[in-house]
Every structure is written in structure tokens, then in C-alpha cells.
Amino acid sequence: MVYTNSQGSCVDHMVRRFRIVLINRPKSVGVGIIVLLTMLFYTATNTPVVPSSTSTRIDVSVPSIPKPPIANKGLARSNGGGNIYDDRFDAVTRDERYKSVGMKGATLWFTGFSGSGKSTIGKELEKVLIKEYRKHAYRLDGDNLRFGLNNDLGFSKEDRNENVRRVGEVAKLFAASGVIVVASLISPYRASRDQVRKIHEEVGLQFIEVFVDVPIDAAAKRDPKGLYKKAKEGKLKGFTGIDAPYEAPLNPEIRLPSHQMTLEEEVRVLVQFLASRGILTATENTPTWYPALIPPDGGMHWEPPSFSVYTEAQAMLFPQ
């Protein structure tokens, strides 16, 4: 919206009006002079002064908000054809998302033989992170996912790799949202695990490989599901460690010989590693003890676990 204002034309108009008043009402000269001076003063103090111009254009239009750019416009995904584009523009940055939940996202990828203890450790870690440290965590268990997401896959090498690929993509989304993912899969092939690591690191997400290092004999002795017995009897084909290979990690971030450790010790190692990576806090200035999860009613009785990385003094500052 644009207005045009002319200071000179306004003064001329008032002078003409004042002349008419003088002609029609000569007795009102004194009053008229006061009125004229008042009008001139008001005009001089409320009209913008512009150099060497008889008028000024005052633009009071609201500037339009620029539309966000379309990310990667014109780059079609190789497996999606020409009508699918990789749009990575987000209205919320990752740092903003992490600050909103008070922590960072990451994926802990547990790998090892069947019966090594991956699921047991994952369950306990998830419980401790949520109930005791008040952090967002979610467990992706390989067996459970085969009832839904991967119910169309078998146990051939190709299907096993696809199983790992799908879970890796889901884990990446969870981690990007600020959740600690606890993924427990045998994932026997090194190349498929390295690919999951790659898709995390490409977008700046932390991928932590946890090798639950239990010898095949110890795992078979446990045999909680009776699978080793069936495999040795020939009732199960393609069973990892019996008639299918397992490629152990070369440089895992964490190695847990669970046949030599207690469950509490294993969880302590994992929590301390997460703390050392800064995953339990959103920023360097966020207190380590501050929770990401607070009950809706605002009340909570909280005590640090026996192996807590927090001191009792820090725990006392926790919101009650």
C-alpha cells in the first residue's frame, strides 16, 4: 500500500482556507492567526522532510516471506524413477529437535550369535534409559520385526541383507528424531552392517556397533529357544554358526563378552559410553542429569541407579 503526501500542497491549501476566513469574518483575524500557526506547526512536525522533492512515496506494504528453496530439485532418486525427488529440507534443524527433547539421537547396533544375549541386554538398557535416566529409547528386535516389517523375508543371504537394510533405515529415522535406538539383530554379514553405518554417518548420525562377543559353544549351551539343537539335528537350515557364516566386527565401538559379564556390568558400560559421546544431553550446556522424559503431572520420584554416572549432588538438583 503506497500513500503520496505533498507538504507544499498542504500548506497552500491551508493558506487559501485562511484567506476565505479573513474575507468572510474580518473580526476573527486574531483567532485565525492562532489557528494558522497551529496548523503550520503540526504540519511541519508530522510531515517527513525529503530533499529537493515536492512529494514522497511512503511504502508501508508488508514484505512477502520468501518461500524455502526446494532441496535437491531435479535430482530423482535412482530407484524411484523420474517423479520422486529427495527433499531433505526441514523447517526444524537437528539441533533444534535435539534441544526440544533434551538429548541426542543415536543407534546402538547389537550383533552376535543367536543366544549371545543381544535381546536381553537391549531390553535392560532400554528399561534403564527410560525409567532411570528418563531418556527416549526404543528397541528394534530382529525377531519381532519379522512378524511385521520383514514378514516377507526368509533367511537366504539376500533376505538377511534386506532385513538389515530395512531395519537400518528405520533406525536412522528414529535417531534423527532424537531417540536412542537399541537394535538387536544377528546381522551376520559385515558388509550389510557397514552399509547401515554408512547411511547414518552420511547424515551426521552416531552409529555405535556393539559386538556381543560370545563363542558359539557358549551360545549353543545357553540355547534359550532350542534352535541350536534343531539346527544340529538338521531341522533348521541356514542357521548362523552351524551351516551359515557369521562375520565378526573388526572394529566395534563396544565389545561385550557377555559370558564373562553380569547384565548390570554390561548396561553400565553402555550407559557410560553414551554419556561420553554426549548423547544423553542436547548441548554441552545441558546438565547431564536433566531428563528428556517428564511425567504429564510433573511429579516424579527419581533416584540415580547404583551405577549412575551422575553424582548424588547432581541428582538432588533433579526436578521433583
Image (spheres, rainbow, N blue to C red):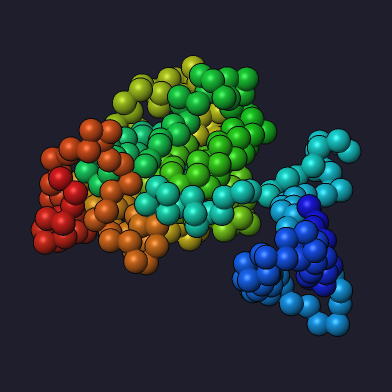
Q: Quadrant of residue 125?
A: top left
Q: Position of residue 7 (x, y in %)?
A: 79, 70
Q: Give the quarter of the figure containing the C terminus.
A: top left
Residue for point 37% across, 52% down: 102
Relative to 47, does residue 225 appear above or below in the rendering?
Answer: above
Relative to 273, does residue 217 appear above or below in the rendering?
Answer: above
Evaluate whether residue 42 shows in this view: no
Which residue is the extreme one toward the front? Answer: 27
Direction from residue 39 to residue 222 in the image, left or right = left
Residue for point 86% across, 74% down: 54
**Residue in the foreground of this view, choosing between 67 and 187:** 67
**Residue in the foreground of this view, choosing between 299 and 29:** 29
**Residue in the foreground of this view, choosing between 189 and 153:** 153
Q: Position of residue 251 (x, y in %)?
A: 48, 60
Direction from residue 273 to residue 299 in the image, left or right = left
Residue for point 61% across, 48% down: 91
Q: Position of residue 87 (x, y in %)?
A: 73, 45
Residue for point 19% across, 49% down: 319
Direction from residue 18 to residue 313 in the image, left or right = left
Q: Position of residue 313 (x, y in %)?
A: 11, 61
**Residue in the foreground of this view, choosing between 154 and 96:** 96
Give the tally of numbered discs: 0
Evaluate whether residue 185 shows in this view: yes
